[in-house]
Image (cartoon, rainbow, N blue to C red):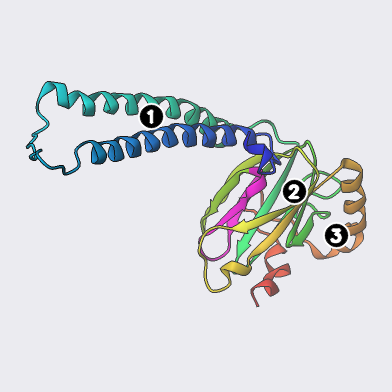
Amino acid sequence: MLQRFATSGSTFAPQIDHLILLIAILVGFWFLAAEFALFWLCFRFRRREGHSAQYITGEEKHLSKWVTWPHFAVIVCDIVILIPAILVWVNVKQSSPPAEQTVRIFSQQWAWSFQEPGPDGALDTADDIRTVGDLHVKVNATYHFELQSRDVLHSFSVPEFRLKQDAVPGRAITGWFKTTRTGTFDIQCTQMCGMGHGLMAAHIIVETPEQHAAWMKSVSNPAAVATSVVAPAPGTGASTEDSKFAEVRQ
């Protein structure tokens, strides 16, 4: 239902949309019920001639049930929300399908830079492709990402993917997504990270396999890369990429 009003670009986006809709329905029901009870009580027991105010402690059994029963009903609703919420969390955060491709995402004040495999399909090799501001991926492909911050807290967010992950300095945080449609989608930083926070925007460009292959061919230069890129030690994620994008800080 929510997909009529918001673009969905990943496989787990509909699950998150359904969870949000479920929460909105249940919370909306109790909001309307509470407001109806409030205004009905205000009207029913309004000040009138010939009727004195009555002091009620609320301890009487026939009165306390109007608090106890809704209380238990709200707990049941919480459980109804909790079950799909746990399932979504496990699917998105605790487990992931096998990766078809792995990319690195670097955040810094105030730009996004990316490292993805070249034609050989492996990271930290001479033909790796490094970009600033645009991440190119294939449609209907499962991507694992490794998210790093070079300075302060940032947050990698792609609203159409329903994807949001904080980037913590000193940590490499992993996650995944599988694209479902082609197009250009906004990447935002949703963690206040300094004066240029509002300008820290980028794009994720989802292409067909043919378009992605053509883009990769247009930006790959194995001969030049082989002489300028030094492969990092396994697992460190460090390479000449840091110096390559140092000017982004300026």
Which contiguous range is marked in magenta?
145-161
* Residue at 12% across, 21% down: 61
Q: Which mark is residue 78?
A: 1
Real-space Cα separation, disc 1 to disc 2, in angstroms? 44 Å
* Residue at 88% across, 58% down: 219
Real-space Cα separation, disc 2 to disc 3, in angstroms? 14 Å
**Which residue position is annotated with label 2?**
123
- Please tell me whether mark 2 sits on a helix, a strand or a loop: loop
The location of residue 16, given as percent across then percent down, is: 57, 36
Q: Earlier in the sequence, mark 1 or mark 2?
A: 1
Considering only vertical position in the picture, is 211 above or below 85?
below
Q: Is residue 112 visible?
A: no
52 drawn magenta: no
Would you call the spot at circle 2 few (<14 residues within 10 Å), some (14-19), or many (20 or more)?
Answer: some
- Please tell me whether mark 3 sits on a helix, a strand or a loop: helix
Would you call the spot at circle 3 few (<14 residues within 10 Å), some (14-19), or many (20 or more)?
Answer: some
| Nearer the observer, 139 or 126 | 139
Q: Amino acid at mark 2?
A: Leu
Left or right of residue 148, residue 33 in this image? left
Q: Earlier in the sequence, mark 2 or mark 3?
A: 2
Would you call the spot at circle 1 few (<14 residues within 10 Å), some (14-19), or many (20 or more)?
Answer: some
Q: Amino acid at mark 3?
A: Ala
Considering only vertical position in the picture, is 145 above or below 112?
above
**Which residue position is annotated with label 3?**
226
